[in-house]
Amino acid sequence: MIQIKNKAILQHISYVRNGVCGALALLCMSLAGAAHAAVSLPQVIGHNMVLQRNKPVAIWGQAAPLEKITVRFRGQQVRAMADGSGNWMVTLKPMAASARPADMIIEGSNRIVLHGILTGEVWLCSGQSNMEYTMRKNSKVTKVAPPEGFSHSPVDELQYAHNDQIRIFLGLRKAMAKRHPAHEGWSVAEDSALRSFSAAAYFFARKLYKELHVPIGMIANAIPGSAIEPWLAGQITAIDPASDQLYFDYSRPGKFYPTLVQTLAPFTIRGFLWYQGETNCFMNDSLQYAFKMQALIRQWRTEWGDQQLPFYYVQIAPFYYGSNKGDYPLTQYTLPKFWEAQALCLQIPQTGMAVTTDLPDNLKNIHPPGKWAVGERLAAIALAKTYKKPVEYSGPVYRRHAVDGNKMTLYFTHTGGGLVAKDGGPLNYFELAGRDGQFFPARAVITGDHIELTSKEVLHPAAARFAWTETAQPDFFNKAGLPAVPFRTDSPYAGVVLK
């Protein structure tokens, strides 16, 4: 037997022995705790939720490492094993729409039963304050006559909203970052839950339900005052002046991305609704905003694993941006240029844009009322482009022009049964310019499906523009009741391509 008399060596051996034992003890304690870790779910998976019909449905959560999980729903039973970090996910096979509430059972070391689940259409709605604008605020707007599709003023909708086939989920940053053992994030769209929910999102759901007759689930996670950058998966690191392309540091996501985007993925949805841009307009973003939207659309689609997910958005409304005394030099043309950047994103597949030039009742209010019109216009886009219904979803869109002497003729798509002056008077906010680039008010006359422009000050027209000022609330519509998209024929961005 070897005897060690050196005290330093003996002390070192003791430290090693104690350290190894301590580490083993901690490991055993950790494994014992993990073995008894309860199966948990993200907040978006809960009672009363709506699952997307006709698509594989992801259900996921956390458990002990290597724990076996079983999920049962509507006759399906699927199993998974948690990975070494305790993450697990199963996929349910596509299901038809069902208004019959059903239970979902999730079992591991514990058993979770989720009640009242429907299957239908699910949309995620995001952006800033105009998307966040609640039904409570909507109820305080000056009453209007019932528009088509309403038996009452939409301002009074809270009194009539009792359809248990419309379910809503309000994502909040602090709550979304945590597991929710009560599983109570979803609500029927009525009473106190609806009062705090997005008005634009609710009216979108209301219109969809009326036309599709299937359960509708709406997820809202808008943040007032937010620019687009916090919603991106990475931070902008540089701009290449040669190509105007933006670059992102994907290792440093925006502050909302981890908590309000990634926490919702991969909850199966039909598509996205986006109402944001006012903050970036104040930043005089112009063309750069188009590239940022392009990046956001790609990133969100990638997060959900589907580059074909529809992305429908709202063009921001007229407002006095030019009177802003902030850090950026703004003029009456800042907003039209921003509108142009938003319209460029229509080049991206599976996108659509709702125009709101007619909705403000006060150009000093950046939150125009009439969110029912916003929701219904977004719904028209979805009905036409996603659900293939024969409805007009856009106001007139400039296509091309021709010049004959002192007259310029403008041609449009989305004539919607014919071009009209909504108020019955002469068309306004049209301008003509010669080769010198000086614009003057133009007389605009509807002739069939096109418009003829003339101006006493412009004998040889070279360019035209429409609604090219921040205060423009033009009366140029189609017979479907949708306002025309602002434009200029001499746009410097004519060669910009977004995909």
Image (cartoon, helix red, strand yellow):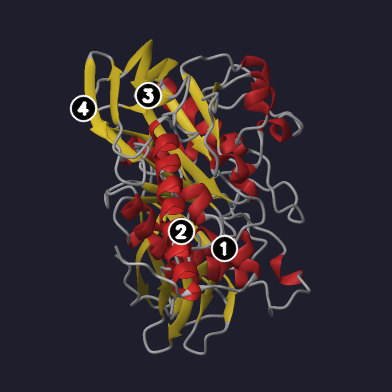
Q: What's the distance in space between the residues labelled 4 and 2, CA to CA?
A: 50 Å
- In the rendering, at what x and y percent does residue 79 appear? 23, 27
Q: What's the distance in space between the residues labelled 3 and 2, CA to CA?
A: 32 Å
Kindly indicate whether the residue at mark 1 contacts the one at mark 4 (C-beta within 8 angstroms): no
Report the residue at 45% width, 75% height from top.
6
Q: Tell me: 33 left or right of 310.
A: right
Mark whose residue sits in front, 4 or 1: 4
Report the residue at 36% width, 49% height from top.
414
Q: Tell me: 13 left or right of 436.
A: left
Kindly indicate whether the residue at mark 3 contacts the one at mark 4 (C-beta within 8 angstroms): no
Badge 2 is on which residue?
A: 19
Of the image marks 1 and 2, the number of the one nearer the N terminus: 2
Q: What's the distance in space between the residues labelled 1 and 2, CA to CA?
A: 75 Å
Badge 4 is on which residue?
A: 93
Q: Amino acid at mark 2?
A: Gly
Relative depth, front residue between 29 and 123: 29
At mark 2, the secondary structure is helix
Rendered view: 112 above or below 459: above
Mark whose residue sits in front, 1 or 3: 3
User: Which quadrant holds the C terminus?
Assistant: bottom left
Badge 3 is on which residue?
A: 109
Report the residue at 36% width, 26% height from top.
51
Q: What's the distance in space between the residues labelled 1 and 3, CA to CA?
A: 63 Å
Of the image marks 4 and 1, the number of the one nearer the N terminus: 4
Kindly indicate whether the residue at mark 2 contacts the one at mark 3 (C-beta within 8 angstroms): no
Which label sits on residue 467? 1
